[in-house]
Amino acid sequence: MSEAIKKFMYVNRKAPYGTVYALESLEVVLIGAAFDQDVSMAFMDDGVFQLTKGQDTGDTGVKNFSPTYKALGDYDVNKLYVEKESLEERGLSLDDLMPLTYEDEDDDWNEKPSIKLVSRSELTDLMEEQDVLMNF
Amino acid sequence: MATLHTVNKSPFEKNSLERCLSTAKDGSTILFIEDGVYSAVKGTKVSSSIEAALGKHNVYALKPDVTTRGLSDNMIDGIELVDYDGFVDLAAECSKVQSWL
């Protein structure tokens, strides 16, 4: 029996490490990826800090889960919407984020960027299109 | 003896930094820890308030929390990095600690 595919968006608004939200979100996304739904992730407010390059947890001893974002493409999670205004307020640009990619099966498996910079109003429209919003 | 003020929350999510800066007396020491280290990033909407504070306070950030978050190359000039031993020294040197949670 085939069920209709739903659009799921995971909305991430918290910085990594200070609270457990970011890690929990990533785990739920990876579990949810097994259900063949149309999955995307949104990063806004302090959530954009989850994707910064160069995270090194050696001195704090907490788990560095930033490399796990690089695996999302292999699970067909390749729409990572990052809100431009949130980046700018935090002195960040796309160059400060990890270069996350996926291989596009509809285009001869070419490697393409997963991160899409969107404005606040574009993100509003994307959220409106979803069937389910999961918030972290 | 001066008071040590610690801030452990992101300045973009909570007003802990703002309250710290408006309350701390000139000459007191401010230390950013945990998500508070996001206050020390260059070019943000709060960085001008930190730059102003540098003239009045000794401002530090806890290095392990900075490196964990990948912020080492993005710090405001003039903020000194300390390790855990340095944190202990600051707490010992100051008469008391006010934690802005």
Image: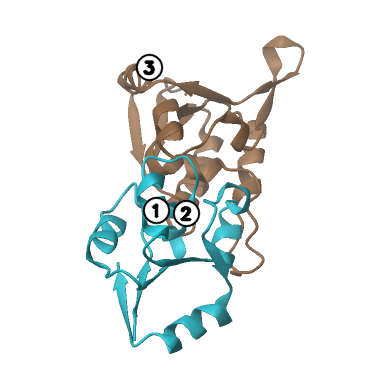
Chain colours: A brown, B cyan
Q: Which residue is mark 1?
A: B50
Task: Answer above or below: position of B33 versus A75.
Answer: below
In three-dimensional space, the C-alpha distance between marks 2 and 1, rounded to whole angstroms, equals: 7 Å
| Identity, as a three-letter code, of the amino acid under mark 3 | Glu
N-terminal of the two: label 2 or label 1? 2
- Helix, strand or loop status at disc 1: helix
- Helix, strand or loop status at disc 2: helix
Q: Identify which residue, B29 or A87, lies in the foreground.
A: B29
Residue A14 appearing in the image: yes
In three-dimensional space, the C-alpha distance between marks 2 and 3, rounded to whole angstroms, equals: 30 Å
Is B31 placed left or right of A107 in the picture?
Answer: left
- As drawn, the residue found furthest toward the top would be A107
Query: Mark 2 and 1 residues: CB-CB less than 8 Å, in contact?
Result: yes
Q: Which mark is residue B40?
A: 2
Residue B32 appearing in the image: no
Q: Which residue is mark 3?
A: A122
